[in-house]
Amino acid sequence: MKQLQTRLTLIIFSIFLAGWIICGWSIWSLEYNGAKKDVIRTATLLLDTAEVVRDYTLTKIQTQFALLTQDKSPQDVSNSADKNQEVPNFNRVTVPSYAAQQILNQLGERKENKGYSYRESTINPTNRKDLAVGWEVEIIEYFAKNPNIKEKIGERLDLISGQKTLYMAKPIQITNSSCLVCHGKPENAPPSLIQTYGSENGFGWKLNEIVGTRIISVPTVVQYHEAQESVGSYLLAIASVFLVAYTIVLLIIQKWITKPLDTITHLLEEISLHQLEKSQLPEDKSNSLNPLNRAINRLLISLNKALEAPKK
């Protein structure tokens, strides 16, 4: 009976262990996907914020700044009466790309947002700091080859921080002709821009052309760490429930299966030793093996009568 009990114990333990592993894997998948969705929602919100900043800078700040200052073209300057007129400095805060990057990156400098970064990079930028490098070039080429795709999401290891980050990228497409004032032909660009950045870079852009990408990077370590903690808590709770259930099942098996079978085995041993007069199984209606006990008892009574009958 000990072998039977050991086998039943191993079978039940294996079933509970398999269930625990399956539950753990399912919970981890749900928590991981939930954490990833949270990161994507955060990235989407930040990228939308950057787009709003760009639009506001383009439609409001640039318009108001143009009313306050006069930045004539080189042709106007050459035709003006005052040849010594000083060219005003180029004000970068009126550039949508610069404004969006400054605001989002200042947000990423806060302690609670550490690791967040926003970048707008192009193949041919006016400011060489915005030059696309490495994986950014691949993303720009991807958007250029697939103009119908408006978003790309992926994960990569940030070599600077050493953290795994989720990035969301969108193409920079020239849909507003006002962008060509500064990025079309050098002779049409504001003199202050030429004076600051020169006339070699950031020109020749065309309407509806995909020239770069906007990328927001969000660290995933915090969300994934929280997911791991949640999974650990769930698994501990499930293990506790399984342990209680496992103990109860073992006690039930011991009381209603292995113990009655032990009694039957002991009885059969007595029969084999011709101790029939002492052999009798207890009858308990709550016992699942009670019908078997009654049948064996009747068989023993018949056998005793047969053995006690006088021989002819």
Image: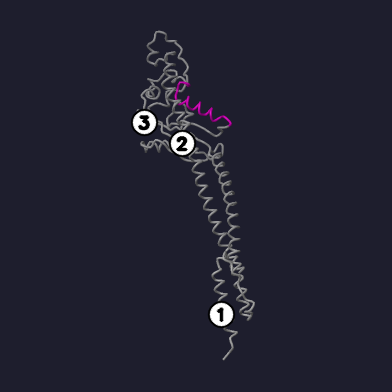
Element at badge 1? helix
Indicate the position of residue 117 as horizontal and vertical percent values: 51, 32
Q: Nearer the viewer, residue 69 or 287?
A: 287
Type of the residue with mark 2: Met
Circles 2 and 1: CB distance less than 8 Å?
no
- Residue 210 location, quadrant: top left
At 47% across and 19% down in the image, what residue appears? 91
At 36% across and 31% down in the image, what residue appears? 209
Q: Is residue 299 highlighted in magenta?
A: no
Residue at mark 2 to residue at mark 1: CA–CA distance? 85 Å
Indicate the position of residue 55 as horizontal and vertical percent values: 42, 24
221, above or below 176, in the image: below
Residue at mark 3 to residue at mark 1: CA–CA distance? 102 Å
Type of the residue with mark 3: Glu
Indicate the position of residue 292 as horizontal and vertical percent values: 54, 71
Element at badge 3? loop
Type of the residue with mark 1: Ser
Q: Residues within 10 Å of mark 2 (few under 14, many from 20)?
A: many
Q: Residues within 10 Å of mark 3 (few under 14, many from 20)?
A: some
* Residue that label 1 marks: 302
Residue range (magenta): 92-111
Question: Which mark is in front, 3 or 1?
Answer: 1
* Residue that label 2 marks: 168
- What secondary structure prevails in the magenta region? helix
